[in-house]
Amino acid sequence: MKIAIVGRKHSGKSTAAAMAVRHLSTHGVPAAIYSFAAPIKRMREVLLDSADIPTPENKEEPIVELPGEPSQRKIEQVLGTEAAREHWHRDFWLGHMKLRLDQRPKNTAAVIDDVRFPNELAWARRNGFHIVWIQRPSSDFDSHPSEQALADERVNANDWVITNDDSLVALETRIEALIDQLSKEAA
């Protein structure tokens, strides 16, 4: 099973992915979360660790030790979008994700928790991923391209939409129902 989760920051994408992996695992299906941003986060960690700068708990908090006082999120956005996508190649992270997915253990379900760009969404659809949109009415607005690139994309008839407007228990119930439905369809 392959699932790709789409949504704005703070919509609950990573939380939903963790819930999906947990539910799959309790049903005997090995599963793992894959993030386009995982290597970007590691780069940010190395950057801060190499200068003994403590990582703020809040991703939006300015890092006052660095000129310009960027937040963790801003560092990750620039490394991921402006450096890799715009400087090297718009499919840079797709190529990296493909290599990582090709290395996953056989029969392990893949849950991508951070689809943010049209080319990532199109790639996931072409490669047989179930697309799950997490919508949260109170999601923060961010003008960065990584948060706005999918604003004009439409939900396809085969996509799933989960509204995250209640408790974690309610979100987990919705994710479990989705996984159960996808499992039935795959059987």
Image (cartoon, rainbow, N blue to C red):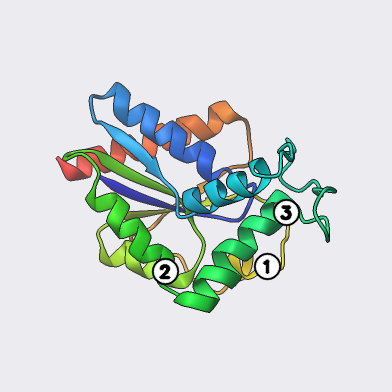
SS class, disc 3: loop
Residue at label 3? 140
Alpha carbons under labels 2 and 3: distance apart: 27 Å
| Quadrant assignment for the C terminus | top left
The nearer-to-camera label among 1 and 3 is 1
**What residue is at 67 percent from the left and 51 percent from the top?**
137
What amino acid is labelled 2 in the image? Phe
| Quadrant assignment for the N terminus | top left
| Residue nearest the viewer, comparing 92 with 26 | 92
Proximity of marks 2 and 1: CB atoms separated by less than 8 Å:
no
Q: Residues within 10 Å of mark 1 (few under 14, many from 20)?
A: few
Residue at label 2? 92
Residue sitting farthest toward the top: 26
SS class, disc 2: helix
Q: Position of residue 69 (x, y in %)?
A: 82, 55
Q: Position of residue 134 (x, y in %)?
A: 52, 50
Q: Could you tell whether 178 is left or right of 154 in the image? A: left
What amino acid is labelled 1 in the image? His
Q: How many marks?
A: 3
Residue at label 1? 144
Alpha carbons under labels 1 and 3: distance apart: 12 Å
What amino acid is labelled 3 in the image? Asp
| Residue nearest the viewer, comparing 136 with 82 | 82
Q: Position of residue 169 (x, y in %)?
A: 55, 26
Residue sitting farthest toward the front: 51
The nearer-to-camera label among 2 and 3 is 2
Task: Give the mark, 2 or 3, whose residue is nearer the N terminus.
Answer: 2
Residue 149 in view in this figure: no
